[in-house]
Amino acid sequence: MKVWLKLAISGLAIAGMLLLAMGSEQPARLTNITSKAPIPIQHGVLEEGLTIVAEDKSFELKGGERFQSPFQSNLWTYGCDINSINGKNVLNNSTQAQLCGGKKVHVFYGNNPEPLYGVLVLNSSIATAKGPASRSYMIKMPSDKIAHAREGNTAVAFEIMKWDNKSRWSHTGAISTTEKTAYAWILWVSAYPL
């Protein structure tokens, strides 16, 4: 055989083996390493002029006073995850929120003795959450939302906490971090029972 033919065959064989070796490499995987260990939020403050009373009378939160959290919801678990109660559909999810630990409440605003019906969620925090909303509740309900609710509509107010979602690439070990958001608390109000 001629030398050039031997070199061509050897080159093709080596190229074929390299292609096979490259094709057998495992694809890169991204593993989520975010710590979602629940951390209760212990305290909060209600804005002046707002009072929230549990429908079962188990707690009362008064405006302008610091309160100890009477309960903790958990929007981080399966079926109650942040995606099931999100910005696009939060207005219509007071029933889902009750399944996730939300409580039925009566909401009093200003000097009006007539209560509004409501559902309150006091979400727990997680280890990777950051910012003031991940450590304390500051519950406010704008007056235009109260007026909207008194007209027979459902209104909702909430506060957002930020958290870091961390993932590790299997082939490099590099960590990827993206900032995400979650609800610290949510309050639905309406002139009719929710």
Image (cartoon, grey):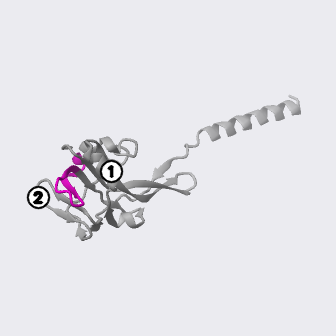
Which residue type does callout 2 highlight? Lys
Question: Residue, x 34% and y 52% (percent of image)?
Answer: 144
Give the mark nearest the N terminus, 1 or 2: 2
Which residue type does callout 1 highlight? Lys
- Check residue 57 in the rendering and tell me which mark sits there, or answer none: 2
Expressed as whole percent of the image width and height from the top left, the position of residue 124 reads 30, 59
Q: Nearer the viewer, residue 98 or 114?
A: 114
- Check residue 145 in the rendering and tell me which mark sits there, or answer none: 1
Count of numbered badges drawn on the protein: 2
Identity of the residue furthest to the top in this view: 1
Query: Magenta includes 155?
Result: no
Examine the rendering and report whether any part of residue 86 can be seen: yes
Q: Are marks 1 and 2 in contact (CB under 8 Å)?
A: no
Near mark 1 (Cα within 10 A), the count class, few <14, some 14-19 or many ≥20, is some
Expressed as whole percent of the image width and height from the top left, the position of residue 106 reads 18, 54
Is 180 left, or right, of 59 in this rendering? Answer: right
| Picture quarter with the C terminus | top left
Magenta segment? 97-118
Question: Residue, x 20% and y 43% (percent of image)?
Answer: 192
Is 124 left, or right, of 181 in this rendering? Answer: left
Expressed as whole percent of the image width and height from the top left, the position of residue 86 reads 38, 46
**Which element type, helix, strand or loop, lies under badge 2?**
loop
7 relative to 38, above or below: above
